[in-house]
Image (cartoon, grey):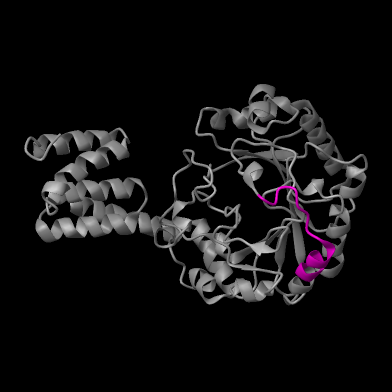
Amino acid sequence: MTKKTLDVGQTLEVAFSLIQENNLPEARKMIDAVLAINPNQPDSICLEGIIYFGLRRLKAAATNFNRTLDLVPSHKTAKLYLEKIKQRLRDVSASQYVKEFSRKQTSHMDYPHNIGIETVGRCNGDCTFCPHEELDRKNDEMDDALFEKVICDLEEIPPQFPINIFPNLVNEPFMDRKIFVRLKAINDRLPNAAISIFSNLNVVSQDFFEEIVQVKNIKSFNVSFNAANKKEYEATMNMDFSRTVENLKELMMEKQKFRFFEGPVVLSRVSDLSDGDTIYAEECANLFGDFTPGKDFVTWVKNRASWLGTIPEKQSSIPHEFPCNAWFDINIFCDGVVPHCCMDATGKYSIGNVKTSSILAIYNDVSFKYLRSQMAVREDVYPCNSCSLLQ
């Protein structure tokens, strides 16, 4: 296709058909070809806006539709999509996610809500959706002095501000031989702290279940399970399926007996954007037939993310029009680095280091605090505009 032979009308018809087929990259190529000849071609500008709308980039879409109307004030499609944007923004404002964000603006503007503490870098899995094997710190461990500083920093949070601690990030928490000593320290010294466990539950110590029931203030127990059949599980996680299933059954039985945390065990799955996502709940119900869905366990299919571009795979749709509740969180790697968020697996976008700064000083850094004070949308924030998670 050349500038001399380009039929604008036909090209835009093909581009519109591609948009309807959700083939946005190819549609964009056709539109760019027209705009290269005439940057002010109104239908091309409008179609580009429709692509932005499909990508949930509402600000960019509105800019295009308004520009279209500047060129052609009666343009019906541009007017229609501007109304769609207004309705979408109303839906976003009314969503539970944004309401939760607003509540946190009141309760956790100065103090973090979730704190991730990666006490070891190790993980026994090699999951297809996780960058762990590429991390420089994958064999490291948080030393006692650094852990003590983290706890001391968190003791500065007034007790009337509830916090939630995840003793993991890009790792398996129960590969820390000191994990139960450290969980007890959290219980003893941070009475305002709930604990959220996130584990693959594949490798546990001989006395694991005796120790886990002694941990207080467990808010939730999430097991990264990902598939309820042996073939898919082992291809995805590179771990023994039968052992994980047995550990899960034991966990649910111990939960029934001791009720050491509220709510059911969460069996999470990272979406692979296939039909497996839709049958996951049914497969789990069949696999754990002796337990009650909704009471003993629930399933959760999480958006697939690229870890801010670390894993160059297709991911779930990016919610550009939303803020991110992770702006009320802070995470600490086992080497002290504080990443931008839990998806910043390598610390490429680090916002500080607890070895040289306090947790609260890092959390209240002007640029990071601005995101939560202004309820920014991801479309305007780098690297958040590359992340598909709604934390």
Residue 327 visible from this viewpoint? yes
Furthest residue in direction front, as rendered = 136
Q: Residue furthest left?
A: 4
Instruction: Find residue 2 and report its image quarter.
Output: top left
Residue at point 61% right, 44% down?
131
Q: Is residue 167 left or right of residue 103?
A: right
* Residue 77 shows in the view: no
x and y, in percent, of residue 327 in the image: 56, 64
The percent position of residue 21, horizontal first and vertical second, equals: 30, 32
Vertical position of residue 321 compared to residue 134: above or below: below
Start and end of the magenta stretch? 136-150
The image quadrant where one finds the C terminus is bottom right
Rendered position, 193 above or below 106? above
Horizontally, residue 136 falls left or right of residue 212, namely: left
Instruction: Classify the position of the N terminus by image quarter.
Output: top left
Q: Position of residue 287 (x, y in %)?
A: 72, 26
Q: Position of residue 175 (x, y in %)?
A: 81, 46
Residue 22 relative to residue 295: left or right: left
Nearest the eye: 231 or 162: 231
Q: For this rendering, which residue is in front, 167 or 258?
A: 167
Task: Tell whether position 146 is magenta.
Answer: yes
The one nearer the camera, 157 or 126, is 126
287 falls in the magenta region: no
Kindly indicate the quadrant of the structure image that contains residue 255: top right
